[in-house]
Amino acid sequence: METLFIGKNMLFLTEVESTNTYAMNLLRNVNAIEGTVVYTDNQTNGKGQRGALWNSDISSNITASVILKPGFLSAGKSFFLSKISALALYDLLTDILGNSHYDIKIKWPNDILVNSKKIAGVLIENTYHNTVLQYSVIGVGLNVNQIEFNELNNYAVSLKLLTGIVYERKQLLGKLCTCLEKWYLTLKANKTDFINETYLSRLLGLNQHLSFKMPDDRVFEAKIIDVNAEGKLCLEMNDLSIRKFEIKEVQLISGF
Ligand code: BTN
């Protein structure tokens, strides 16, 4: 492993409900060291964004959680963990796929799409101590060798579906650790402008007019102009006013 700390301690579980929940419990019970990675071949009750389930075929994909202790980060800046996780996955996929034949994009907040289909998602769970972050569990689901997504076939894709190659998952996980550590150290060095610029440059739909859906199913058109420090999506509405939305408040539904 070519890292300083992420992935030095790897904990493999044949089966677990959720690697995120397991990692959170590890922190509570034995105070696992920073950089510990919990991964499994069979996640039976995987958690996704917005309370959804994350389903993954057995022994096909990466389902892993990385334990971080970002005590240097104030609570108000916790969204930087989302940004660096997405950037790490973006770098990993660029490294594997190359840039030319594949359109790799970050979909706010931190989904990764290739050729308009979702290949990876991230679920981050944090604990806080006073005004700073204490623990952070970065849960990553990356579709690697799965080739059937059933009712999600139009929306999901895997590396195998894209290239026809069967990938060695442990090796990919090692590379993901390297990419994540690079971005985590960038954050620790406080290079937040660089992180923001890079995240925006890879964001799906920046400066484009797209359709969005509210929780009550109302649909509207707007232009993405920024993702602010709190992780809110900043939209320019048709009347040119700027509105800021949290993850629960809006969903991008077209334009990709
Ligand atoms: C999303 O909805 O896009 C987020 C998906 C996150 C899934 C991963 S799989 C490993 C980790 N453990 C979980 O229960 N969820 C995350």
Image: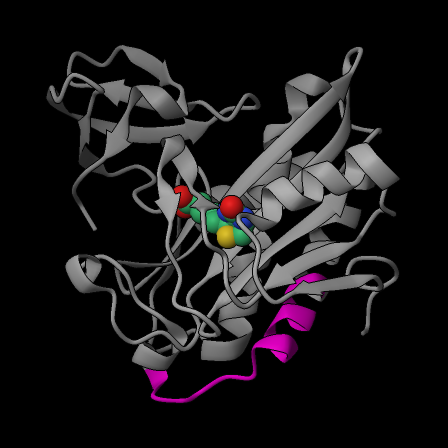
On the rendered structure, is 64 left or right of 233?
A: right
Front residue (pair 26, 133) = 26
Q: How is the image coloured?
A: one colour
On the rendered structure, is 245 left or right of 74?
A: left
On the rendered structure, is 38 left or right of 45?
A: right
* Percent coordinates x, y for residue 52 in the rendering: 35, 38
User: Residue at left 60%, top 74%?
Assistant: 172
User: Residue at left 38%, top 31%?
Assistant: 50
Please identify the quarter of the rendering in which residue 250 is found.
top left
* Percent coordinates x, y for residue 78 in the rendering: 64, 27
Whether residue 214 is visible: yes
Please identify the quarter of the rendering in which residue 32 is found.
top right
Q: Is 205 above or below relative to 176?
A: above
**170 magenta-colored:** yes
Q: Is 178 above or below relative to 21?
A: below
- What range is drawn magenta here? 163-177
On the rendered structure, is 226 left or right of 85?
A: left
Q: Main secondary structure of the magenta part?
A: helix
Front residue (pair 221, 32) = 32
Whether residue 86 is visible: no
* Percent coordinates x, y for residue 16 in the rendering: 57, 54
Please identify the quarter of the rendering in which residue 242 is found.
top left
User: Residue at left 16%, top 42%?
Assistant: 254
Q: Residue furthest bottom?
A: 165
* Percent coordinates x, y for residue 175 in the rendering: 66, 71
User: Residue at left 31%, top 19%?
Assistant: 249
**188 magenta-colored:** no
Front residue (pair 186, 184) = 184
